[in-house]
Image (cartoon, rainbow, N blue to C red):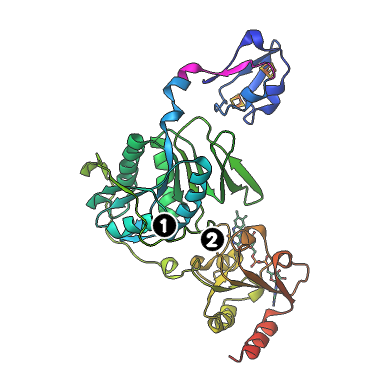
């Protein structure tokens, strides 16, 4: 245990008992006793008015936080193409690096990636750690977690950010376990604490009904996966340069236990909701799958794409690739039409940052109207044809 009570200083005030988020403290003979549920979060240390709770010094020596510097962004590439989420992480990483007073760095794995290295510099990376190896062209859990884990051990970043994509969600926990550190998944907001300089990681919890802000005070690096589509992309400055650091990996062939036989593009990769400027989204109010044909007409008139609520996806009316919301895609189009969508919090979480929200719903009390810029109370099967007629399509 790394948090201990100095028995002679404890006055039995019980303040620490109430403060412990893990119910790890009990009172015995009017003295606080820390039990096995303690996660060493440190909350009780600050709460005790008599300085009776301290960190175990042995652990402090083992875990020297001052050795860690800089913010790293995992530059996810697929088939040699840098993924958009990496640019979003660079945008967010820059703000954090400015607040923290450290360098913004990127780490990229694979071979023949000099074009990606240039892009990372152009988008604000001051250093790029390039783990150049043919075996890393294709993502594998073993290959990436070993190669990046080695680099983390060698160069000791303070913060590591990954996109909460399928790859990032697989890699993040493996890296965190290898580095024996904390990870917060699917963050939607990141800030630097002015006092501690640690990162405050906010993510929706309990189905989006609660926003949890999580810190990692005692272990490094502090790691987060970040929800794609939420952060602003970094600006591109042509010709920006930085320091390129080629990292040697200790990876051995036999370390990689999976063999990728074939990569099949699913509809999900073809549908690009995150890039769409106009989205016409349909929910249960459509009544049936056929309703999406009408939405397609409206989307086409604006050069946009259709999307859906989870209820419409669950009803089997449309592929999951089109789902907007907390468990679907987060979108930020210029115009978002919500047609026959009630506006549940889990849906709104994925589209509330859209430029203009236009809601069409028969129920004037539907919560979607609370966030809509333009609300039309009416049957979408009457309203949309009227709009199409006005548009002359
Ligand atoms: C953990 C968790 C995660 C979730 N993740 C997501 C997610 O990612 N995305 C998501 O969307 N949901 C998600 N949900 C589900 C969410 O809570 C709602 O159930 C869902 O968004 C409701 O979809 P809806 O608005 O299409 O359907 P309903 O809530 O049934 O709303 C239908 C609306 O259509 C209106 N309507 C009916 N007929 C017409 C008509 N003819 N013209 C116009 N309006 C009409 C009704 O008034 C009603 O407001 C999640 C839920 C949980 C618990
Ligand atoms: S360090 Fe945190 S978890 Fe441990 S006893 Fe104190 S408040 Fe509870
Ligand atoms: S807050 Fe301090 S003094 Fe009060 S019970 Fe806990 S350890 Fe003892």
Q: Is residue 138 toward the left or the right of residue 31 in the image?
A: left
- Return the x and y of residue 298 as percentages of the image width and height: 58, 82
Identify the residue at horizontal 47%, vertical 56% (top origin). 88
Circle 2: element type: loop
For the residue pair 387 and 166, the one nearer the viewer reads as 387
Between discs 2 and 1, the one toward the N terminus: 1
Residue at the top extreme, as displayed:
8
Q: Residues within 10 Å of mark 1 (few under 14, many from 20)?
A: many
Instruction: Find disc 2 in the rendering and name its residue.
Output: 328
Confirm or reject: label 2 Cβ below 8 Å from ligand 1: yes
Please give the range of residues in magenta.
49-59
44 in magenta? no
Q: Is residue 317 visible?
A: no
Mark 2, Cα crowd under 10 Å, few <14 / some 14-19 / many 20+, is some
Residue extending farthest to the right is: 365
- The residue beneath circle 1 is 123
Q: Quadrant of residue 180?
A: top left
Left or right: residue 344 compared with residue 258 = right
- Foreground mark, 2 or 1? 1
**The label number, if any, that marks residue 267 in the structure image:** none
């Amino acid at each position: 245990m790394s948090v201990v009570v100095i028995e002679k200083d404890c006055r039995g005030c019980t303040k620490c008992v109430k403060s412990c988020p893990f119910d790890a403290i009990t009172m015995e003979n009017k003295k606080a006793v820390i039990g096995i549920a303690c996660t060493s979060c440190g909350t009780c240390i600050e709460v005790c008015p008599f300085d009776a709770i301290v960190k175990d010094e042995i652990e402090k020596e083992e875990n020297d936080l001052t050795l860690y510097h800089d913010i790293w962004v995992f530059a996810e590439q697929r088939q040699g193409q840098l993924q958009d989420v990496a640019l979003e992480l660079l945008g967010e990483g820059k703000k954090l690096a400015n607040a923290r007073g450290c360098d913004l760095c990127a780490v990229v794995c694979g071979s023949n990636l000099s074009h990606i290295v240039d892009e990372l510099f152009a988008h604000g990376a001051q250093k790029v750690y390039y783990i150049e190896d043919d075996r890393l062209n294709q993502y594998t859990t073993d290959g990436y977690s070993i190669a990046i884990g080695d680099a983390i051990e060698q160069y000791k970043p303070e913060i590591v950010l990954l996109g909460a994509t399928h790859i990032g969600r697989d890699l993040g926990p493996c890296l965190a376990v290898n580095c024996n550190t904390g990870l917060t998944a699917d963050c939607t907001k990141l800030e630097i604490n002015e006092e501690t300089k640690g990162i405050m990681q906010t993510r929706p919890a309990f189905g989006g009904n609660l926003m949890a802000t999580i810190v990692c005070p005692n272990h490094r690096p502090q790691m987060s996966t970040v929800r794609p589509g939420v952060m602003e992309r970094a600006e591109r400055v042509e010709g920006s340069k930085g320091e390129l650091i080629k990292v040697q990996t200790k990876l051995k062939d036999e370390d990689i236990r999976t063999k990728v036989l074939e990569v099949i593009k699913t509809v999900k990769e073809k549908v690009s909701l995150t890039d769409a400027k106009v989205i016409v989204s349909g929910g249960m109010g459509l009544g049936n799958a056929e309703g999406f044909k009408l939405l397609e007409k409206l989307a086409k008139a604006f050069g946009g794409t259709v999307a859906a609520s989870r209820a419409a996806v669950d009803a089997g009316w449309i592929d999951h690739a089109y789902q907007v919301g907390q468990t679907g895609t987060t979108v930020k189009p210029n115009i978002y039409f919500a047609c026959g969508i009630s506006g549940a919090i889990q849906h709104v979480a994925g589209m509330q940052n859209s430029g203009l929200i236009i809601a069409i719903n028969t129920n004037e009390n539907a919560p979607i109207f609370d966030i809509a810029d333009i609300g039309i109370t009416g049957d979408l099967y009457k309203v949309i044809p009227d709009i199409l007629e006005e548009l002359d399509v």
